[in-house]
Amino acid sequence: MTMVHSLTINQLIEKLRGGELTSRQIMEACLNRIDSVDDKLNAFISYDVEDALAQADIADKARSEGQEGPLLGVPVAIKDVIAVKNHPLNCASKILGNYESPYDATVIKKLREAGAIIFGRVNMDEFAMGSSTENSAFGPSRNPWDIDYIPGGSSGGSAVAVSADECIASLGSDTGGSIRQPAALCGCVGLKPTYGRVSRYGLVAFASSLDQIGSFTKDVKDAAIMLQVIAGLDDKDSTSVPEPVPDYTAALSGELKGMRIGLPREYQVDGLDTEVKAATESAVAKLEELGAEVKEISLPHTEYAIATYYIIATAEASANLARFEGVRYGARIYGEDPEEMNCKTRGAGFGDEVKRRIILGTYVLSSGYYDAYYLRAQKVRTLIRQDFLEAFEHVDLIATPTTPTPAFKIGEKAKDPLEMYLSDIFTISCNLAGLCGVSLPCGFSEKGLPIGLQLLGRPFGESDLLRAAHVYQEATDWHTKRPDLD
Amino acid sequence: MEYELVIGLETHVQLNTRTKMWCGCANEYGSDSNTNICPICLGLPGVLPVLNEAALRKTALTGFLLNCSVPGYAKWDRKNYFYPDNPKNYQLTQLDFPSTVDGYVNFESLGEIVKVRINRAHLEEDVGKSFHFADYSGIDFNRAGVPLLEIVTEPDINSAEMAYDYLNALKIILEYGAVSDCDMEKGQVRCDVNISVRPKGQSELGEKVEIKNMNSFSGIRRAITYEFKRQVEVLEKGGMLVQETRRWDDNAGVTDSMRTKEDAHDYRYFPDPDLMPHRPSDEWLSAIREGVVELPLDRKMRMMSQYKIPHESADVFVREPLLGDYFEQAAKGVKNSKSVANWVINNLQAKLVESGTTIDGLTFSPAAIGELVDLVESGKISSKIAQEVFNEMFKSGVSPLDIIESKGLSQVSDTVQLKAFCEEVVAANPSSVDDFRDGKDAALNFLKGQVMKVSRGKANPKMVDDLLREMLVD
């Protein structure tokens, strides 16, 4: 029997409309689920039971008065990097102390307008820097399919909360794969919209030119519902784009016949796990069987993507994180003068990975090195984008494994940052090129760990992306599998 | 050996937009500390900047006023440095693609018209202001995010006086364009000086020294004078100058070294990823061009030639643009525009000060002043009566002609009537008549005064003079 907390948005809304369930019941079910499993999983940094139930009651009242909303009464968990008014905002770091945001991010405003219950702060790598959620000041999150394994990152908590049915959907952010990678490793659907599709206002910036907010959901239909709510131009974000927002749910219906799917030659890398390879190949075969036309493509600058990413992302981060020094908010450690206060506060407040990236970013922007690193990286970024735009002349979507391996063990790569960086090899280019991408479950390893298929689409090509993913899910049942946590 | 000065100025000017550069907070001086603030100008986690279009317009307008060109592409960069008054610990500014470039300012200095080239006028954001108390410091972020224009000259300035004149000329140009209120006491204008000396005739520049912390134009003049002397003394003693930043101490009247080149900041500039580059369209620019006003120096030259007024008067009208505008309306169609200028500067201005009113509050039209001047010119009234008419006009707003008519103030030029006045006065003052006849010329002035009195000031003074002489010489 399906427990209510494992419902999808689509199923839940139907039950709420039909009066079979109330928002309070679903909220309580989620809270009970958290009570029983989150000690093991550590998906949530914090949540406010009273506030969540109050929002649920408001949603029930609104519904009883005849109001509607695409997410009316649906509990959505929020990655601890997105500002929610009067909720803690820590970015899984010590440096923010007991800071609470005085304002709502634009996506939160939109979720509220759609009726969602804004619920909880979910765990992540500190300031979204990492691929395992081990870099959290609040302890690592654990993979619900095997708690000795990492859930991926940086939005690990968002993925765990959805996969373990602790909430119905969640928001995360993706700078180099931080939505798609944990979605793949936890077996849920992670959508990274095109850069500019969703407002970044209220998302604490890691790398401003790469960051994008997206959703974690239990299936593709829910991803379409979430995107419909959060997408659109925002006059508070100059990088959001006035591209019209299509009807994503309507775009799901249709078939794959005639859709061209490209397989990048350069993604046949040495480190690719055989089980991952097999699972994604059979997923591609399934897509072909469903009518898609599959062909090989070339993305010649692929090998430079990781280096390019770690120059641009860290350079931007070094400036973005400069504001955390204890002058206006957050934790403060006093010093004799402002400089000493800065050094002590930042020294104690940031974790190792964040410091490593700030130092790297500071270095690549330094006088005398700027041209060799930052400027060159920007040029390579343009080439990488051109690779994709050229490929999209010939295909409609690109299919790849989301990650080169299934989840690795907690602590396995924590000592080797470079090894950790390589786990983002298939997801990073999408951010550099400003594309949209989705990861969806396509199988399991022998150990029972989920494997994800990544589909990449043209800028603002979310409709095609979601349709292909949806048609695949209609024909498979990977997305319906749930970890056994009892 | 003779040395020459080479000076370039970097002037920061706050634009007088209604709101700040990236958010809707008021751009307002004098509010209580930390009242004009919001998450955006405080740099709270997650916020993003959105450009204030009015700041872009005022920047482009300033560019036009400074004869700059406005490139088709401008972008914003992050200048990274830690300071408690800098909310994001980076300042948004324009490094290599500024909004305006390559202009010049013509102005008067030491009696001639000189030119200083403008390298650029770029837009950036102001930071907060620190206050230091006994055992702690506070920061007021009201100023953080106020649009700030940095106007950078080429090293074309060669004396303290010229720097001073440039700054005054710049200030008045910006006031003309209504882009800044330019109140130095409110910190709306701040200036850093780049200065070097070299033996006269040498083409190579000396070591550049930057002086900061001057809080008035005259302070800048003093700092340059001091620094020139100091640098020349170092060189004369066989010493070496180093590239450094020095702080002006206004009380002591000296500069002190702040930092040398070795510990200069590395600002690690890079393009801001949160803001899109600005590509001004032709329509946008031509709409702004319509706001370009006549420059102060052009106005002065035109007024001097158009109205034949002395440069002192023209200077007054340049300094006081509203008074100048009033003058130009008053002088319309009046033959003796110089006299109109005198009336406006000497009488009107004095009366405005005395009564505490402004030009906007006047109850008569500028044309009334022209009318008054014409009445004097045509001999209808004496200048003394004109004074009386003016006072009445200022009080009641009634036109000069109406005042003259209702009060019967027209000058009397009728010989028969004047003769009668003169005869009356001569008969009543026999001793003065005798004095005059004995050669005391001053007695005639007394008699003339008496005639004016009898006529209640209306007698034509020239005719009275002629008539009296005629009568007394017989």
Image (cartoon, rainbow, N blue to C red):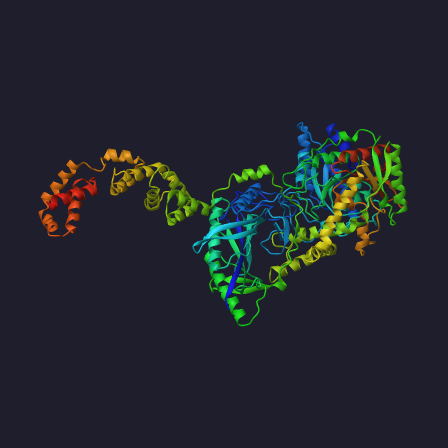
Residue B115 can be seen in this image: yes
Quadrant in the rendering for residue B210:
bottom right
Say which of B125 and B466 sits in front.
B466
Residue A191 can be seen in this image: no
Where residue A339 appears, x then y in whole percent? Answer: 62, 60
- Residue that protrudes farthest toward the front in the picture: B474
Where residue B301 appears, x then y in whole percent? Answer: 43, 46
In this rendering, would A143 be left or right of B275? right
Where residue B49 appears, x then y in whole percent? Answer: 62, 45
Residue at x-position 49% and y-position 44%: B177
Marks counted in the figure total 0
- Residue that protrudes farthest toward the bottom in the picture: B237
Where residue B223 appears, x then y in whole percent? Answer: 49, 61
Say which of A398 and A126 sits in front.
A398
Say which of B60 and A318 sits in front.
B60
Which quarter of the figure is the C terminus of chain B placed in? top left
> Eyeballing the image, is A413 above or below B283?
below
